[in-house]
Amino acid sequence: MDINITFNSRGFRTKAVDLAYREAVRDILAYAEDRAKTYAPRRTGNLQRNIDSTRVIKTGGVCIGEVHVKKTAPYAKWVESGTGMWGPYHMPIVPKTGNFLKFKWKGHTVYARSVKGQHGRHFMELAYQDTNRLYIPYRLQKLKREIGAALSVTT
């Protein structure tokens, strides 16, 4: 459930071009993180607080970064993909032991033989689609202008 961004700048070995690539990856990660936080459901705000992006790592001319949910929100995968009928097994949630599920809902204790589950909210998928469709084309055009300016200054 991560969004990975990778740029390869091996063909260009100037410091200004490498800096432009790194800044582009940083901008794209910041946008994707903001979109994920916007799309994440908010009840307590814990899920939104735990969406984070890594710092940009440059190894061998490749800039890498990712947007992810921290381990302090382990339920994020179920919020993203859904549970029960809408989850990976497409089956209602039933008790493992005993005859009833017992849970609190709207201040009342509920006993049920099964529950349908919840639809996935797909907040990371939506953030990826927005970033890929809207921001990356814009940022690549800006990067192209920055590289052109950097290369014209150095030659």
Image (tube, rainbow, N blue to C red):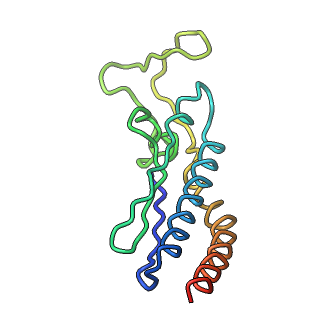
Q: Residue at x 39, y 74 (%)?
A: 61
x and y, in percent, of residue 20 in the image: 55, 70
Along the line of sight, which residue is nearer the eye, 71 or 88? 71
Q: Residue furthest front?
A: 154
How many numbered discs sit on the rendered protein?
Answer: 0
x and y, in percent, of residue 18 in the image: 48, 72
x and y, in percent, of residue 30 in the image: 58, 52
Q: Residue at x 44, y 58 (%)?
A: 56
Q: Residue at x 62, y 61 (%)?
A: 131
Image quadrant holding the C terminus, namely bottom right
Horizontal relation, residue 65 to residue 40: left or right: left
In this rendering, the answer to whether 149 lies above or below 122 is below
In this rendering, the answer to whether 64 lies above or below 62 is above
Along the line of sight, which residue is nearer the eye, 46 or 137? 137
Q: Quadrant of residue 44?
A: top right
In this rendering, the answer to whether 23 lies above or below 123 is below
Along the line of sight, which residue is nearer the eye, 5 or 15? 15
Q: Residue furthest top?
A: 108
Q: Residue at x 61, y 27 (%)?
A: 43
Horizontal relation, residue 61 to residue 21: left or right: left
x and y, in percent, of residue 104 in the image: 52, 14
Q: Residue furthest left?
A: 97
In this rendering, the answer to whether 140 lies above or below 118 is below
